[in-house]
Amino acid sequence: MERVGRGRTIGAYHLDLMPMVGITDDGMPLMTPCDAVPDDLLGFNYATGCKDPDVRRSNGVHFFLDDYQFERVWKFPVDYGDRLADFQCVLTPDYSLYRDMPLPMQRWNCYRSRFVGAVWQTMGLDVIPTLQWSTPDSYSFAFDGMPTDSVVAVSTVGVLNDKTATRLWVQGFEEAIRRLKPTLVLLYGKPIPGYTMPCEFIRYENHNIRRLKQWEEEEEAAPEAAEKRAAVERCRN
């Protein structure tokens, strides 16, 4: 029984997969540079149910969602690597780094994101690192294990309506650019008003916002049709 329990613990923390990835001096998984640039970005919650091969070949998969929607990726990284392998590319999971979250929890979420991304890279997927940080206290681990001279991704979702969050986003983003020197930034969401990006970037639309606006327009024009459309979208989730 002791061996069975130990085996389950090793599996839960993926210690059996550790030989697949390199680590930094501080133990953070290492990712290698990626030069993939997706035509568009599809949320993980939609990607897993997408059967259209053309859509899969022309989209990258993002994780700019609530964490509960992709917690399973940490539990089964190899399984989901197989499921996402035919997409144009995938971003690393964006596990939350809230500024009021204890730093050890933030470090753990960075570790998980980096580890999943590194495992997927060893499986042959094109994996774009997702930039994550909270306050300056997080910088010591937020960028550890991230590659330099790579395409990276970042999101402004949830930032624009909070002045403190906006200030910390700009501050952390410029620190990331200084340390990592990315070749290109994939920006998911709206740009920061009045802020000039200090690097080359491509913006991708937040499709969740677009769908909400479309539903509002449909509801005003034909409430019954809008309700049917909303029911279909809920099923997809």
Image (cartoon, grey):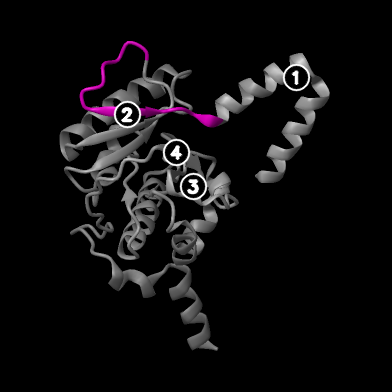
Q: Residue at x 76, y 15 (%)?
A: 221
Residue beneath disc 4: 41
Mark 4 or 3, nearer chain start: 4
Kind of residue sitting beneath label 1 = Glu
Residue 219: image tag: 1
Identify the magenta region: 193-207
Q: Secondary structure at mark 3?
A: helix
Residue beneath disc 3: 54
Kind of residue sitting beneath label 4 = Leu
Instruction: Residue lying at the far top in this picture: please name it.
Output: 194
Alpha carbon distance from label 4 to label 1: 26 Å
Question: How far from the left and from the top, in percent, is residue 17?
Answer: 36, 71
Mark 4 or 1, nearer chain start: 4
Question: How far from the left and from the top, in percent, is residue 78?
Answer: 44, 66
Mark 1 or 2, nearer chain start: 2
Mark 3 or 1, nearer chain start: 3
Check contact, mark 4 vs mark 1: CB within 8 A: no
Alpha carbon distance from label 1 to label 2: 32 Å
Residue beneath disc 2: 202
